[in-house]
Amino acid sequence: MIERISLYILPLMILGILTFGLIKKVPVYEEFIEGAKDGFKVSVSIIPYLVAIIVAVSMFRASGVIDVLKNVTSNLLPPDIIPLMLTRPLSGSAALGIFSDIVNSHGADSYIAKLAAIMVGSSETTFYVLSVYFGSVGIKKYRYALLTGIIADVISFVLAIWVAQYFFLATN
Amino acid sequence: MNYIFFTLIILSIIAGILNNRLDLVVNSMLEACNLAVKISFSLIGIMAFWLGIMRIAEKSGLVSILSKLISPLTKIIFKDLKKDDPALGNITMSITANALGLTNAATPIGLKVMQELQESNPKKDIATDSMCMFLGMNTAGFQIIPATVIAILVGAGAKNPTEIIIPTLIVTTLSFLAAIATALLLQRIWRKYD
């Protein structure tokens, strides 16, 4: 069902935009090419920012800092949740990796797996988004954007813990 | 960002030495450089495609229709933009693409929004209120159906993988609203320091 919906959305969006363009007598092919010309420039212009953020995050992951933190904080929350919370704003693929580990080690129907699923599903890779989006237009001073992102992440994790307890602990 | 970059790298090197994993840290550094270029290059095609499609949407007036439709909302949220700013239509499309989980479309559209916001920015290296708001909404990660997460649960043999949809939707909606509220609040506080 879900896969069906997401399968249709993209083609329908493209169809809608093209049809509307034709009705409004837009030369759709020429305008498409005109817009598409920027694709290379934009993609290549984000390389320095991608290198910076991906290198820093990969080194951080490889160094084992997160494992140390996991031991320190294990009496506050289920231990495997902490690295997930720390990784989520930094790297999407790393967070999905940790999430898969949790699902496999605790079982897909465990409370921790469900809590982790809610956390991953309701947040974004804040640092990555900020560095790439601001980088693409050359913004150096982020002002309060980073603080907003971090506060939103913290709020979503706290909410996730509450909601998961309400939905999946109360009934068991 | 300077502090975060510095802290991540210094911590990694120190922890790498203490944990005796310095070789892993160095390897991952070299691999990450390659990965960054790979990501960027794999983005070129899809970026060109969406920028082409978006150009049609813009020229046909679809984007400005969208901007006007949501202007009652965006007037409150994006105070420093004009009512018919083309960025507003693209912001809507970007948030929609994110909400539907269309990551391939969301990044190109989002980067286009940043370009448009940058055009009306008087100081080219300092973020505007609209940029902070847009990225705040973006990093809150509003998503209607967390398809990847469900796929992993299904792969691991969950009995009822779709039961996380409703709780996730509650959390993601509330944190999306919280991000908007936070950005509006910080906007006021920051103005005193600028």
Image (cartoon, coloured by chain):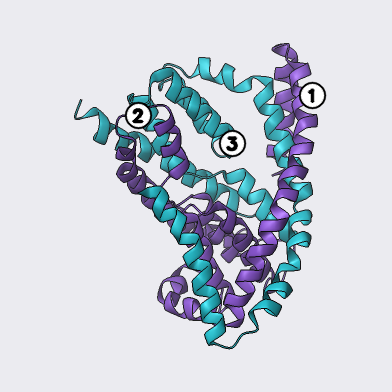
Chain colours: A cyan, B purple
Q: Measuring from the top left, give residue B70's x and y in whole percent.
A: 43, 74
Label 1 or label 2, whichever comes before in sequence order? 1
Residue placed furthest toward the left: A171
In which quadrant of the rendered view does residue A113 lie?
Answer: top left
- Give the side of residue A61 with respect to residue A74, left or right: right
In depth, the one of B190 and B116 nearer the eye is B116
Task: Say the numbered circle drawn on residue B53.
Answer: none
Q: Are marks 3 and 2 on the same chain?
A: no
Residue occupying image coordinates x 60% and y 63%:
B109
Asked if marks 3 and 1 touch (Cβ < 8 Å), the reply is no
- Give the side of residue A38 with respect to residue B193, left or right: right
Which three-letter amino acid code belongs to the residue tagged 1?
A: Val
Classify B169 as above or below B122.
above
Residue occupying image coordinates x 34% and y 35%:
B161
Which three-letter amino acid code belongs to the residue tagged 2?
A: Ala
Classify A141 as above or below B54.
above
Residue hosting label 2: B158
Which three-letter amino acid code belongs to the residue tagged 3?
A: Ser
Whole-angstrom CA distance, mark 3 to mark 1, is: 20 Å
Residue hosting label 3: A93
Residue hosting label 1: B26
